[in-house]
Image: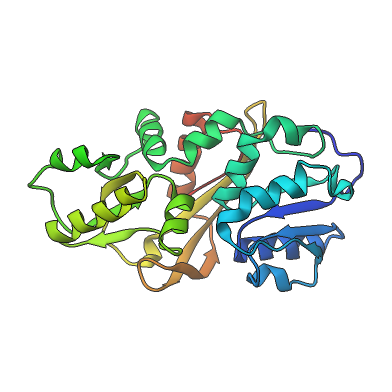
Amino acid sequence: MTTAKTNKPPVVILGGSSNALAVARSLGKHGVDIYLSVLERNCATFTRYAKKVFPIQDKKQVDAVWSDLLLRGSHPELHGSIIFPCNDDGLEFIARHRKELEAHYILDDSETDFVLAMLNKRKTMDMARAAGIPIPLYAAVERREDIAGIDRNIKFPLIVKPQHSHLFQKAFNGEKLFFVNNWEELEARLEQVLSHGLKVILSEMIPGPDTQLASYYTYIDKNGQLLFHFTKRVVRRFPKNNGQGSYHITEWVEEVAEIGKKFFLGVGLRGLGNVE
């Protein structure tokens, strides 16, 4: 991690929503200058802790907006800031422009190829399996020819998950995934996603209420040291079983921490990591 010139360098938050708001509030309370670049009228844009907001009118414009903001020298007052991504678009932007950004900003210890691999659900599944982590059964569909290769005895319901969530959400107005209950629904959804040039995985549905969802967070520095551990679990989502978390509880979940730590050490994470 590049050394900061001051004790409290400014922070530029890229993307996100409630998480971006939480970061802005937490750091802002400690006297950190916060700059936000998120979608227009996003909840984070209303925080009093933002020194300035650079709104994005269309989620398809994020790369252009952030390139102008951070790479073209139009805002030299941001130089020396920590860049803090709060969604997949932000992670991808930093990964693809890391060399240019490092010249003027403070970045975490993440590695470009690793970040890009983790943004792909298929590659993440393969990495988890190689690290000895149990994963759901899945099949990849990347072209129309793959549909013919799907086992006709496959059990429904299934989840059609994007390999790249942020690209899928742009194509389908924020939808995260599709549930399908039979072959007709599956074929129709696959035709939809393939028509947008998207790649997906078909995953078995793991039964259980939203309260079964929990997540593990850590930061692993360039020397492989874990700097903190944190777990939380979901109490409620809206809509049920598919929506955003509307009620979380901070709670130490030992099993989740053990599996999360094993996963991140096994795949070679550097930087901030979160696994659900």
Quadrant of the rendered image containing residue 73: top right
Colouring used for the render: rainbow
In the picture, the quarter occupied by the N terminus is top right
Task: Give the residue displayed 84% in from the left and 60% down from the top.
Answer: 30
Left or right, residue 187 beside residue 112: left
| Quarter of the image where one finds residue 241 | bottom left
Residue, x 27% and y 49% (percent of image)? 203
Residue sitting at x 75%, y 61%: 54
Residue 49 percent location from the top left of the image: 80, 67
Q: Which residue lies furthest to the top in this view?
A: 223
Task: Tell which of 176 and 148 is nearer to you.
Answer: 148
Q: Which residue is drawn at 59% across and 31% down?
A: 112
Q: Is residue 18 above or below residue 150?
A: below
Q: Which residue lies furthest to the right in this view?
A: 6
193 sits to left or right of 87: left
Q: x, y percentage for residue 16?
A: 61, 59
Q: Is residue 66 left or right of residue 167?
A: right
Q: Where is residue 12 in the image (x, y as percent from the top left)?
A: 76, 52
